[in-house]
Image (cartoon, rainbow, N blue to C red):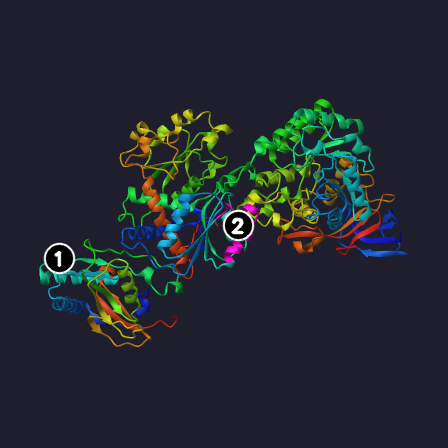
Amino acid sequence: MQRHLISAADLTRDDAVLILDTAEEMARVADRPIKKLPTLRGRTIVNLFFEDSTRTRISFEAAEKRLSADVINFSAKGSSVSKGESLKDTAQTLEAMGVDAVVIRHGASGAPYRLANSGWIDAAVVNAGDGTHQHPTQALLDAFTMRRRLIGPDAGIGQDLEGKRITIVGDVLHSRVARSNVDLLHTLGAEVTLVAPPTLMPVGIESWPCEVSYDLDSTLPKSDAVMMLRVQRERMNAAFFPTEREYSRRYGLDGDRMARMPEHAVVMHPGPMVRGMEITAEVADSDRCTVVEQVANGVSIRMAVLYLLLGGNEPAVTQTRTEEK
Amino acid sequence: MDTHDSQSDARPVLEGPDIARVLTRIAHEIVERAKGADDVVLLGIPTRGVFLARRIADKLEQITERKVPCGSLDITMYRDDLRMHPPRALARTEIPGDGIDGRLVVLVDDVLFSGRTIRAALDALNDIGRPRAVQLAVLVDRGHRELPIRADYVGKNLPTSLRETVKVQLAEEDGRDTVLLGAKPAAQ
Amino acid sequence: MSKILIRGAKVLGGEPQDVLIDGGTIAEVGAGLSAEGAEVVEAEGKVLLPGLVDLHTHLREPGREDSETVLTGTRAAASGGYTTVFAMANTFPVADTAGVVEQVWRLGKEHGYCDVQPIGAVTVGLEGRKLAELGAMHESAAGVTVFSDDGKCVHDAVIMRRALEYVKAFGGVVAQHAQEPRLTEGAEMNEGVVSAQLGLGGWPAVAEESIIARDVLLADHVGSRVHICHLSTAGSVEIVRWAKSRGIAVTAEVTPHHLLLTDELVRTYNPVFKVNPPLRTERDVMALREALADGTIDIVATDHAPHPHEDKDCEWAAAAMGMVGLETALSVVQETMVDTGLLDWAGVADRMSFKPAQIGQAKGHGRPVSAGEPANLTLVDTAYRGPVDPAGFASRSRNTPYEGRELPGRVTHTWLRGKATLVDGKLT
């Protein structure tokens, strides 16, 4: 593994499977009376959040605390950042306090990459979501959820997602979750189909390792998992689609549509859900919907990532990537 | 992990039948010292300790005609040398259904050396429950302890030099049962 | 002023000749000229060009003297072989009145490193709503003939039409920064494969091409001429080529960086590659080179855009757009056009001196290297090759995309009306 986790595309198949396998063991800690491991004792991790995201921050914080790391939470609001301090100065200030790792959420695509590669700091950088670029731990927890549901917690150990058909529906254009998932699922051997109105697909998407469709109904019967992305109502005002009603009718997942999915297929959502927009309450509350599991799995995945990046004297060793650069 | 080539000059100190015999003896000792072994829980330390624990559990079942709870205890995240290596892949921790509270836990490992693994295992146990007592069974005790730890059941005491390696091979993992004593590779 | 004999230089890349400068003028060009009474500059193997003319420079003064001043900018220009730069109007205050343009013009004159020809804003405050006093700026001491809202597009078709019409009265030209504003809201880089992966806001080629198409049609309709700033896409090239074939009075410039760099570099998220218009694709780069070679694109202009370190030492979204270029322009042109065989040195003289001087009506610049002409000259060691070291820049800013990159060619001497501004690579 690399020293930082910036993009799901940086992970090899073996890296990703190691993270999923490790998360499987971490998940078992949650069932114990003492949900804590001494592994990162003496390590300091800062959660550097320039964007509000309570759920992601809490998930990382829970993971860090279960591994006994010292945790510093830094939110940009009301801090020196809102007074104009630069990312570089903020990062260097934190590093001066002896931080071993920075978990960063930032509204600007590429901010974590810059932080990791500009020589500003030595700490390991974990991307907790940047702009419309990447959210690698989300993709990992999604893959973990799929592997548990579609293969099984024990049967899945050592396995990737070869041949699994995953459909991702919604605002692909503005979605770091979609980008990360396409990269990771492709690495893990899954077949990904993106479904959205053409206005919510980026120009240049043809280079992505996935299929693209504008028609949800025809892809549902061929899906092992359907991931619904949040669609913000404001997009309507920028003419990405005519009305909320029309969007829901064409791309929302309701009970009728869910019935067209294979019986074993699951419905996923990275949260927070906009009920009535991309997903109906009936689907969101059904047994096939993994939203709550995804939250629990998020902690296990983040524990695994932090352990594999920070648990030793260097990141965990797996095969190096041969394809691409 | 050592390859077979680097072990080519290693000589066997225990062969298959010897291993079976000492495990039987350890099982009998456990029954004797635990007065029937009715509250015993065996926890093997991955990788090979788990196979040894299962074999001992089978023998205990033959002796006592009762199923003896047997599980595994991964100590990776409790090691004191974590910062000296890249992180290792985790192995499974599997605590038998009724847990360990109030029971006699017998930890099982293949080789007892510095004692640090067992120290980590005791810490790990601490986070899982509160046993009545904890005992230790090992196939080989090669000496050179760095901590005040001793085994309750020893398959074979094997005096060694620090320039030697002891390698346990078990059928479940390695295709055969043997304990090899060899020279440490010069590179290390 | 004393005499200078430049000995054995390849004039415009041709046969070695001697060039004698007397006072501010070229006295004689020929073989074996007498060195009597003259300071001799040995120029064997070097190429002598007419002083370069940059139609697109940001000198930042007044208002952003932390990134560049007229002094530091003209020193950078002299370092790069330029004898005239056209200073863009997007200063603080904006150069939209006779007062501001005269101030910039005077500062250039006082410092004496390079002539500074201010460009006037087309609209008041670059706001695109109300025409600035174009006539007054033209009649001022600065004699403005080029007008541009560069940095912003004159996007209102009626305002653009009026500006094109109005400058006809005194032979001016409007230089358009072609960027359809609605199509580029939130734009951070070229829209395409790379932006889709990086999750950066896309700046589509069509936002440039649609404005160019509109403006060449407007220029045709009102019988004026239009100049296109920093043309960056293959589609734009095709539109300009079509317009020229129809006899429309359009000229176009390309920057050195658009001739060399592509949007693949943005994968580093290093804002030193953030520029407007953005770096495009390999296909665009090749089309731009070809268009510069065949004359569809008339000139190379630097779009020298200095920014202080902190405006680039940050995340992509927060960074300023632009690159410095005066001190590397000729090297990049040699790399992309000369060393590739697309253009000879006479062609370089045409694209970087004759034509830009013509378009901007810079008197006394962009003249042939022959007797009786003003001695505005640039001597280039074309055999040199080495890494770009921003620490050696004369510009106040260091935001070059070429740091550490090996490039050919080095300007060793620059003469402005016979006065050396650069000698052996050192400013005087």
The front one of A19 and C332 is A19
Would you identify the image quadrant in which residue C302 lies?
top right
The front one of A17 and A86 is A86
Q: Are marks 2 and 1 on the same chain?
A: no
Chain letter for the residue marked with disc 1 in the picture? B
Q: Amino acid at mark 2?
A: Arg
In the displayed image of the protein, which residue is found farthest to the right?
C37
Question: Where is mark 2, residue-wise?
Answer: A114
Local secondary structure at mark 1: loop
Q: Give the percent coordinates (x, y) of residue A102.
A: 46, 53
Would you identify the image quadrant in which residue B95 lies?
bottom left
Left or right for A125, reference C339: left
Question: Where is mark 1, residue-wise?
Answer: B67
Q: Amino acid at mark 1?
A: Lys
Local secondary structure at mark 2: helix
Q: Is residue C334 magenta?
A: no
